[in-house]
């Protein structure tokens, strides 16, 4: 029952966020982008802040996430955790299809309110970095935590994974390449997909074991 309520809340929030994003520039989007900029629309703060933000956003880049997914999958296969390896691959590939598919279905333009601090080439909604960092970090943490006995260690891993995904998403707004609603939708989509795949694989594992 609890998981169904969680799905419902996440789905409703994602629907509302999508509606806000697609009706046009909302007050939330404009305020979120401008909050990180000074009067000249440059990134507020010291010069080195931009370097740190670009480093953080790189954690959610395709190549970094692919590398991490391949390494984790290989380790799980070598440990004969084939269901866990399948779960990681299924989460990642499905996340890519959902994220890229939604981008080209909605076709939302990138923000033009502030200068972009990096180059971008794909539509804006939902954020692929936000979606895939949530899928890979949070999803990977769920799979790894299954192998750990101490509850405190599991919780610490999940919290760190969620914080990492949140930082990646925020960095995209700071760089001016995403509206805040792009990020929120990406996070929600990622969490929904991870929870569904995790539940599906857990049930399938139980059925096979029985």
Image: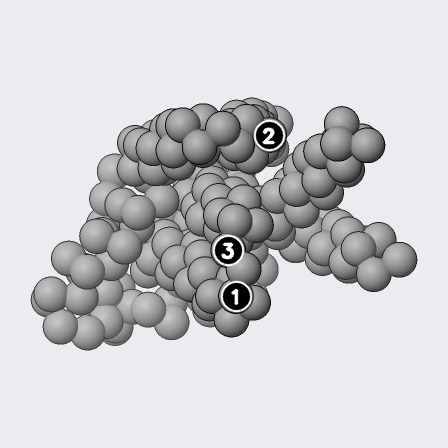
Viewer-side label of 2, 1 = 1
Residue 90: x and y in percent read: 57, 28
Disc 1 residue crowd, few under 14, some 14–19, many 20+, Cα 10 Å: few
Q: Residue at x 38, y 71 (%)?
A: 35
In the rendered view, would you say 42 is above or below 137?
below
Cα distance between the residues tagged 1 and 3: 6 Å
Cα distance between the residues tagged 3 and 2: 16 Å
Dot placed on the residue nearer the N-terminal end, 3 or 2: 2
Circle 2 is placed at which residue position? 83
Q: Residue at x 44, y 32 (%)?
A: 79
Residue 148: mark: 3
Q: Are marks 1 and 3 in contact (CB under 8 Å)?
A: yes
Residue 160: x and y in percent read: 42, 63
Q: Are marks 3 and 2 in contact (CB under 8 Å)?
A: no
Q: Residue at x 72, y 55 (%)?
A: 10
Q: Is residue 65 left or right of residue 206?
A: left
Q: SS class of the residue under badge 1?
A: loop
Residue 150: mark: 1
In the rendered view, would you say 135 is above or below 6?
above
């Amino acid at each position: 029952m609890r998981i169904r309520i969680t799905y419902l809340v996440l789905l409703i929030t994602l629907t509302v966020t999508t509606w806000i994003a697609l009706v046009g520039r909302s007050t939330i989007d404009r305020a979120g982008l401008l909050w990180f900029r000074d009067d000249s629309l440059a990134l507020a703060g010291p010069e080195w802040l931009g370097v740190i933000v670009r480093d953080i956003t790189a954690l959610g880049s395709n190549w970094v996430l692919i590398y991490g997914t391949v390494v984790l999958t290989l380790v799980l296969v070598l440990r004969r955790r084939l269901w866990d390896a399948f779960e990681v691959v299924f989460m990642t590939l499905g996340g890519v299809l959902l994220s890229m598919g939604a981008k080209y279905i909605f076709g939302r333009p990138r923000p033009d309110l502030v200068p972009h601090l990096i180059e971008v080439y794909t539509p804006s909604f939902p954020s692929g970095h936000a979606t895939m960092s949530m899928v890979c970090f949070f999803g990977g943490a769920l799979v790894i935590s299954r192998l750990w006995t101490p509850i405190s260690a599991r919780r610490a891993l999940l919290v760190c994974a969620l914080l990492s995904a949140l930082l990646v998403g925020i960095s995209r707004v700071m760089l001016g390449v995403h509206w805040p609603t792009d990020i929120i939708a990406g996070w929600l989509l990622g969490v929904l997909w991870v929870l569904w795949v995790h539940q599906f694989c857990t049930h399938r594992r139980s059925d096979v074991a029985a």
